Amino acid sequence: MALIEDRIAALASMTSAQLRSEWRLLARTEAPNVGRKLLALAVACRLQEKELGGLNPTIKRELNRLGTQYAKIGKLAIEPSVTLKAGSRLCPSSDKLRQLAV
């Protein structure tokens, strides 16, 4: 982990040209036309993604679907995954929340 931390720390002192070069190495595409600070954040994100793994493919598909939907109609139709009733109490259960009927 120290190696990635060192690489990310080094981004702060890189020039725009160096950051663009780093982006080309990581993404194998031309760097986006953004400012130096945003490009440094994008490169840091890409470094972390390559080292630690990216988003789950299911989540990527859902985000793409939502982006397309928003581009078409200007709003998102998201169904809640959990519906709570008035008077419900939420109690921790391992790493999830469990609904208790009152």
Image (cartoon, rainbow, N blue to C red):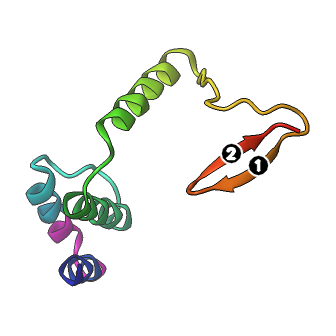
**Circle number at residue 90:** 1
What residue sits 27% from the left and 80% below the top? 5
The quadrant where residue 98 appears? top right
In magenta, the rendered stretch is 12-19
- Quadrant (top left/top right/bottom left/bottom right) for the N terminus: bottom left
Viewer-proximal residue among 63 and 18: 63
- Residue 17: x %, y % from top left: 16, 67
Q: Are marks 1 and 2 in contact (CB under 8 Å)?
A: yes
- Quadrant (top left/top right/bottom left/bottom right) for the C terminus: top right
- Residue 18: x %, y % from top left: 15, 70
The quadrant where residue 82 appears? top right
The quadrant where residue 62 appears? top left
Viewer-proximal residue among 78 and 20: 78
Q: Is residue 36 left or right of residue 88?
A: left
Amino acid type at image mark 2: Arg
To which residue does mark 2 refer?
98
Viewer-proximal residue among 54 and 28: 54
